[in-house]
Image (tube, rainbow, N blue to C red):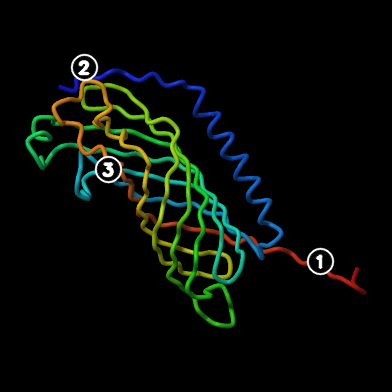
Amino acid sequence: MLSSLRAYHTDKTVLPKFLKKSFLIAAFLLSTFSAKAQDSEVGFELGAYNYLGDVARTYDFGNSTLGAQFFVKKHLNNGFNTRISAGYGKLKGVDNEAFDVFSANRKASFKGRFFNVDFLWEYNFLDYRDEKLQKFWTPYILFGLGAYKYTGEDGSGTSYDSGLNLKLPIGIGLKYRIDRRWTLAASTSAIKTNSDTLDNVSVDTPSIKDYRGGNPNDDDWMFFTSISISYTLYKIVCPQGKFR
């Protein structure tokens, strides 16, 4: 039934332009907060993405796919820090376990990839960075917004894309300060994608008929579970007064 889906044509120049603009925005935001920041971190995050939508209605570890991103953080105070990240991820799903007669007849599947840029806030419940307090760990929450561009291919080989969309991540995590410079963290987050086209079986998809397009009122979701390592960059204070 999906073999007659219309192929979507993707402008290959859109993605480089999107990434270039995203990094320019990231640089501007970092420069805006640098005056207030005590120090900053640079790091790398690696984890697994998972999809929840019309093709997969329950969380399935078999749908886990690799994702990674680089990030920069600015510490605003003992509790809050901002984070800007850019990364790459994959998604996949399949109608392995039919939840109704329509999905049983549909037998849909898809796989795809996306590039994303996020601007997040993190709140640390404990002051794990204060050497005097000897608190080497803290739970934290993260929330914010981001943008992504997704391109995919369904089970019949039809290519499509979701266009440029905003996403809203929210999550929880745990940080551990290895030493004065290095921090290890683990987190999991749910991401509202504001799109129902990641699996290419929405009611607006051409040739998807007879109620096989799923629920038009539910957007697709992503989940990201990851570990990260970051390096803290401390400012060097120049001597003042008689030492100048």
Q: Secondary structure at mark 1?
A: loop
Q: How far separated are the C-alphas under marks 3 and 2?
A: 24 Å
Percent position of residue 21, x then y? 59, 35
Element at label 3: loop
Residue under label 1: 238
Q: Residues within 10 Å of mark 2 (few under 14, many from 20)?
A: few
Callout 2 amino acid: Ser
Q: Which mark is residue 218?
A: 3
Location of the C terminus by quadrant is bottom right
* The one of 23 and 228 positioned closer to us in this rendering: 23
35 vs 16, left or right, is: right
3 or 2: mark nearer the eye = 3
Relative horizontal placement of residue 39, taking residue 3 as reference (left or right): right
Horizontal side of residue 80 vs 116, given as left or right: right
Q: Is residue 161 above or below residue 48?
A: above
Which label number is shown at residue 4?
2
Residue sitting at 31 percent across and 35 percent down? 198
Of tags 1 and 3, which is closer to the observer? 3
| Kind of residue sitting beneath label 3 | Asp
Measure the alpha-carbon separation of dots 1 and 3: 55 Å
Q: Residue at x 47, y 22 (%)?
A: 12
